[in-house]
Image: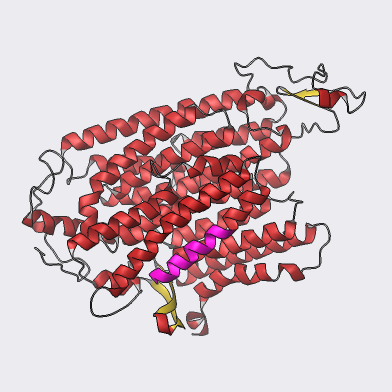
Amino acid sequence: MIADQFPWLTTIVLLPLVAALLIPFVPDKDGKRVRWYALGVGITDFVLMCYVFWKHYDPSSATFQLVEQYAWVPQLGLNWAVSIDGVSAPLVLLAGLVTTLSIFAAWQVDLKPRLFYCLMLVLYSAQIGVFVAQDILLLFIMWEVELIPVYLLVSIWGGQKRQYAAMKFLLYTAAASIFILVAGLAMAFYGDNVTFDMVELGLKDYPLALELLLYAGLLVAFGVKLAVFPLHTWLPDAHGEASSPVSMVLAGVLLKMGGYGLIRLNLGLLADAHVYFAPVLAILGVVNIIYGAFNSFAQSNMKRRLAYSSVSHMGFVLLGIASFTDLGINGAMLQMISHGLIASLLFFLAGVTYDRTHTMAMKEMGGIGQAMPTVFALFTIGVMASLALPGMSGFASELSVFVGVTTSDIYSSSFRTVTVFLAAVGVILTPIYLLSMLREVFYNSGAVPSCDIAPVCDITDADLKNQGNQEAVCFGTNCVLPVDAKFSDARPREVFIALCFLLLIIGIGVYPKMAMQMYDVKTVAVNAQVRQSYTQIAQVNPQIYAEGFLVPNVAESEVTPILGIVKRYPR
């Protein structure tokens, strides 16, 4: 009985934040103790959420569960209201896993380690708070809190252009998040009762014009975070300059906040407007897939290539959300989970490679596969997962989206054919830019190296000459002195981190139900509500779109109340 009444979600959200505030009091001189402390907090929180979801979460229910509500600022109507359902539960677990492993990946941070791990724990707390917030104003607050540690982590521990990348990230995401606040206030103050609770907001009957404006504003806000074209340009810069542990969180968790917001608010609260915007999402999804693939192929920086790959893969999330099918939305959720694992793995391995080569320029790395066979093998498996090799999670998610769009009875056959064909072009481009990356990095690439992987090479760099009479060695095309050369293969810690991702990637690929069963009931309910809205709108305005774009007529049998909510038309 006590376990049922315990504030589990509040504890999961606040534990990393409270632990971060205690870091200044951790006795430590060289940063070794504080890193163990931060890792211990991350593991504890992740184990706690696994226990709570295993014992107290019911995946067969589409309602909010583990609801906790406390008055926070009564004068503003702001409550600490947290809960989980099928949309949030898997993303909470993803955030816990990725952030904990990113802390473990940052094991060699020696610049201001207290501040680094403090910011990582604050980020941990904020992103969990976004996924469990049931109060839309609380969601906005957590969304804003998350921006601060990311900005500092990029601007302090980033590359040469870190200040530019960090400021661009902050400006894009902070400006876009204003739309969340404005939309939340508009929904809260509309009607007779003022409320920020998402359940009550979903029961309000908004005018269609207002709903369309709200949807457009939230699409901008979440589109920036999801890196939807043309709101994506902050992402390659942030990834290119951020350290690999930070890139793991950016790609593995923060991008998913955009997809989560679209499903939670745009579909869940503004289903009528989604009927009008769904074809736009489908078109944007196709643009993301092809645009991201072509731009990825053009990058010579490894992390920027992976960043544009993320832009491309997020297009499948948009396609699935726009499909009007259970399988399509399920595929969008699975794509977010799958990409979170795969992208985190690839950015981690990019960091492992950088630790050895001290460069992200792929043309300077040709041949390092001979020196690091284990890293080469892990990177190859990660790339195969990213290009959707059967048996990997990427294959299951992308196939679900494709089948969902193809079998949609809302869109016309011509629209489905063009959409699926163009998306398939992006799928064909994916192995081209990923396999070429493997070739350039781990094999001898087309670039003419200044030396091969060999114990000796000529020193032509003036700085190296001035360091003494040591004989230089070569790593790819980078000549360094023996004391600086590290030809070591993956260490046990690095292999462990990679295996944590790979086991889940392969496990979900072989048995997708392992992930789908957590959210299937909820996504089916969300899609049923959206289809109900389409049915009612099509009855009043069967030519809502030009003929051939959407199928205007829906079977009369589909006109049924969904979740006890019946909306009346016309307005």
Image vertical order of residue 425 relative to residue 132, above or below:
above
In magenta stretch: residue 126: no
List the single residue furthest toward the right. 469
Q: Locate residue 226, reporting x and y percent.
A: 42, 49
Image vertical order of residue 369 relative to residue 395, above or below:
above
User: Along the horizontal axis of the image, is 32 left or right of 84?
Assistant: right
Q: Quadrant of the C terminus?
A: bottom left
> How was the colour assigned to the protein in this rendering?
secondary structure
Image vertical order of residue 544 relative to residue 518, above or below:
above
Determine the image quadrant of residue 208. bottom left
Closer to the camera in the image, 56 or 454: 454
User: Along the horizontal axis of the image, is 58 left or right of 491?
Assistant: left
Residue 351 in view here: yes
Q: Residue at x 20, y 51 (%)?
A: 276
User: Along the horizontal axis of the image, is 503 left or right of 375?
Assistant: left
User: Along the horizontal axis of the image, is 398 left or right of 27?
Assistant: left
Q: Residue at x 78, y 33 (%)?
A: 486
Magenta segment, principal secondary structure?
Answer: helix
Determine the image quadrant of residue 537. bottom left
Q: Residue at x 48, y 37 (%)?
A: 308
Q: Locate residue 31, reporting x and y percent.
A: 78, 57
Q: Locate residue 247, reporting x and y percent.
A: 58, 46
Q: Locate residue 427, reporting x and y percent.
A: 39, 32
Residue 502 in view here: no
Count every numbered label the image shows and give the total: 0
Where are the magenta residues, as a range?
A: 135-148
